[in-house]
Amino acid sequence: MVKFVPQANRILLAVWLIACLILNNLFNGEVKANLLVKSDTARINSAEDVLRDPKIVPITMKNSPITTALQVSSMESVRKLYDRMAAMGGEIPVPEIYTAKTMELVQQRKAVIVTDMMTGRVQSSLFCPVLSGFFYVGTQILTSLRSVWYFRNGIDPAVTREIDKRILWVFESPFPLLRYHELFPKGSTCFLDTYKQDRSSSFHPLSFRDMRAVFILTGFLFALAFVFLFIELVVFGLYRCADCIAGEAHAYPR
């Protein structure tokens, strides 16, 4: 005698197998997406690169020596860069430049910041723990702003010696002196191919945050498995109860 499997059991088994197939593919896709290497986007290295894309907004400090240097530059591309900056409202106050909103525009290739490398690197590195993207410093030097310290030749030699002594104290002190290894102890990890401060290609230990999606998906699979197990137990119990009721009905006929 052949014992046939009830239709409800077949439907439940089919749903279970299809759900397992879909969730398994989702799990494999998530793992593959986490392990894929993203290709680099085109980098902006010069004023010409900015001018090629009409949507990029050049940003710099308003009423600063940089704006004057851009206007009187000997390079035509730099002068055109300033013209676009003035037309698109890229000259903004200093407090509004280095904000999360502006830094996000830079990472989205919607804006570039025209400033000196030291200020740009120091201020941008503060957003490395906040933003998930990377920053890149272009290789073209738009202008050179020279500055010197000078004092009167007939100044008292004692004053000169005191100045030299205090300068020596500053250099020998343990306080930060605008050195790269002191300015960027951790923040340089979000800069790409920028001189010796690039840490984007270095290897880091695998953390829970890297596999967070995998753990969440695994927990979801366990929860779904328990739900289907509960449904199977309930259905099995209902069938057993139905068989018991049917057996009692046959045992005690009216």
Image (tube, rainbow, N blue to C red):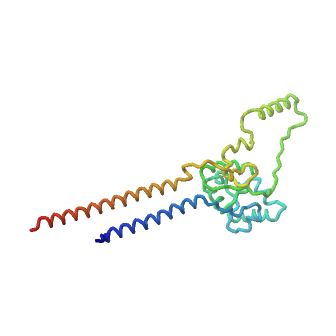
Instruction: Identify which residue is drawn at 82% across, 60% down.
Output: 73
Instruction: Identify which residue is drawn at 90% across, 34% down.
Output: 154
Instruction: Identify which residue is drawn at 74% across, 44% down.
Output: 180
**Where's residue 214, x and y in %?**
51, 56
Between 214 and 14, the one lying in front of the other is 14
**Where's residue 50, x and y in %?**
73, 64
Between 93 and 99, the one lying in front of the other is 99
Counting every numbered tag in the picture gives 0
Name the image quarter holding residue 247: bottom left
**Where's residue 1, x and y in %?**
28, 71
Is 65 placed left or right of 248 in the picture? right
Give the residue furthest to the top.
Answer: 158
**Compared with residue 178, is residue 243 higher up or lower down, i.e. above or below?**
below
Name the image quarter holding residue 55: bottom right
**Where's residue 8, x and y in %?**
32, 69
Is 148 placed left or right of 220 in the picture? right
Give the residue furthest to the front.
Answer: 1
